Amino acid sequence: MKSLFAEVVFTRIHARITVLICSLVAAVLGLMGPFFQKEFIDQLTGVESKLHFIQFDHTLSYIIGAFFCVLLAQAFSQLTNFLSVREALHMQKVFAKRLYNKTLHLRVDTMSGRPVGEIVSLYATDVQGATVFLDQTLPAGASTLFPLILAPFAISLLFDIPLWPTVLVMLGISCLNTFMAFRQSKFFFNFKQLAAERIGLVNEWIQNIRTIRILSWTHHFERNIFAKREIETRNRVSMVTNGQMMNSISTSITFFLNVVALATLVFYSKHTLTSGELLALLWIVAVFLTRPFRQMPWFFTFAFDSWTSLRRLEEFFSTQNNETSQTSQERRHAELADKYALQVRGLNLTVAQRKILKNVDLDIAHGEFVAVVGEVGAGKSMLLLSLLKETGAHFDFYHLGGKNALNVPVDEVRAHFAYVPQEGFIMNATLRENVAFLYDIEAERDPMVEESLRLAQFDLDTERVEKGLNTEIGERGVNLSGGQKQRVGLARVHYHEAPIMLLDDCLSAVDVDTEQKLFEQLLLGAWADRTRLLVTHRLSALHRVDRILFMEDGQIIDSGTYEELLARNEKFREYTTSVAKEATEKESAKKAEVSHV
Ligand SMILES: Nc1ncnc2c1ncn2[C@@H]1O[C@H](COP(=O)(O)OP(=O)(O)OP(=O)(O)O)[C@@H](O)[C@H]1O
Ligand SMILES: [Mg+2]
């Protein structure tokens, strides 16, 4: 992969070169100013000049020349800044878009362990940080380097003195600045890292605020965030102190250069000094070089800083989805008929050396209603996600509606499915937008939205949604109950027709009555001819489905009707007994709570 640094440097190379040319012109014009001033003073005082690059008839023309040189130098320096910022914004757009696409294409098993806050921080800090090279380092570097390289030569040429004393002092200053800047960039790096960690914490805190409050974890969380903040503040204090030291040193350093340049002039000049020469020297050292000296440490700091952001982004961009190597046993399976909506052979999923799904085979007929059951952690959710190609699962064979689903774009595979995730998914938008899954949809779709909600047993009149379809649901559905969220999820999949429904425990929060109605009107009603895979822990659902897949430890260990499994499978009987026991305990706990109130 082309390195991001190379990309930053070589994308739109003509623009980068224009920036350099502009700042070179600014540096040359900046040095011509003092030359004209020297000529002006020398003419006024009647001293014969040693060098005549440009000659004017009128003495006043020299000072006008000096004025225009300074003015033009400023103009070119501003132009350099403008062009650099424009280039930086362009690159920010490129990186932000890539970050977004990358995040979108990383699958759930690859994303694990990477907190959302980290990606937010990459977006908020590192995308800008990476392009600091363009809007700060490049112009600062050009407007620092060119004057610093050109000034000793100009001094030596204009005043006819040796080069080495000024060059030596400048090298010394550069080393000191590099050291300080290196220190500063370490503080900068910590600053970004700590901010990313804090954003991660705050993000987690906000997302779970309701639960945290109920469980009285607020203080614990706050303490964590404050502790992080304290470390951040200490780092910031060091950063500011070091920054101020850098500024002080770089501002006063011109004094040394002044002394060295003057001393060299006094000791090595082969002629008597003129007042014009003195003024020009002071102008070059004390005025012209002030900005480059001030900028030099920041140039290094920004360069190091930009480098770390580029590395962070590069690391994220190079994250690959786990391998899905494909051995082709497809021909062997080609004879399998296409009466099936979904067929899978040899589905295996390994995450971090752990086998999550082992040799799963599936034959789901068109219109079949299948329940997937098993203990917590058996792999039910991962099975659904794998079918959606959201994990790095390996399939020996995978057909959807009789067509090979391997080696086809992920979007094409997903078009076969409607999916309700276990944790639900609600956007910070109106009820209408949440069902239609589209912002600003036209009002003529309302009857379809209402019908979907009605079938999902979400009654607009009794659910306390005061503004009907226009009710704002809030981030992650904070204004809805768990059962309401699940029903909105069901309404959404009904609205978006798809041949195969993947429903991950989407009835867990609805009451028995509502479940009954959902089965009658939706799951066995409106969806009667659709293919349905329902993950559930509800025993009441099991006698309503055509078939049950019983999972244990990543494998489907049995498949059949409720009665068949009860009759022949000891483990299944144990499972149903434990689920029933758990349900009874929950029910009695609820009753106790109610009688307490
Ligand atoms: N993103 C992930 N990365 C790595 N491992 C995961 C990930 N999600 C789940 N797992 C692991 O995969 C196994 C199966 O998890 P899965 O979520 O499929 O269980 P489940 O059967 O749906 O359980 P439940 O009934 O609680 O929903 C678990 O052991 C879990 O630790
Ligand atoms: Mg699950």
Image: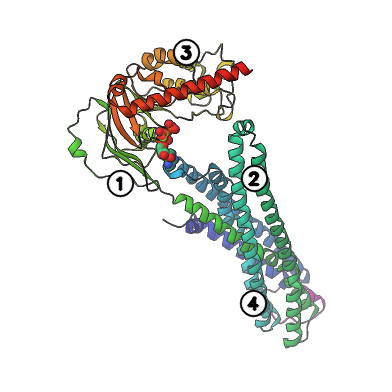
Q: Which secondary structure lies at badge 2?
A: helix
The disc placed on residue 325 is: 1
- Viewport quadrant of the C terminus: top right
Task: Tell me if residue 120 is in the magenta stretch.
Answer: no
Disc 4 residue type (three-letter): Phe
- What residue span does the magenta drawing correspond to? 40-55
Horizontally, residue 464 falls left or right of residue 280, namely left
Residue position for label 2? 224
Disc 1 residue type (three-letter): Ser
Callout 2–callout 4 Cβ contact below 8 Å: no
Q: Which secondary structure lies at badge 4?
A: helix
Asked whether the viewer can see residue 257, the reply is yes
Residue sitting nearer the eye, 566 or 229: 566
Earlier along the polypeptide chain: callout 2 or callout 4?
Answer: 4
Quadrant of res 473 = top right
Q: Which marked residue is nearer to the observer: mark 2 or mark 4?
A: 2
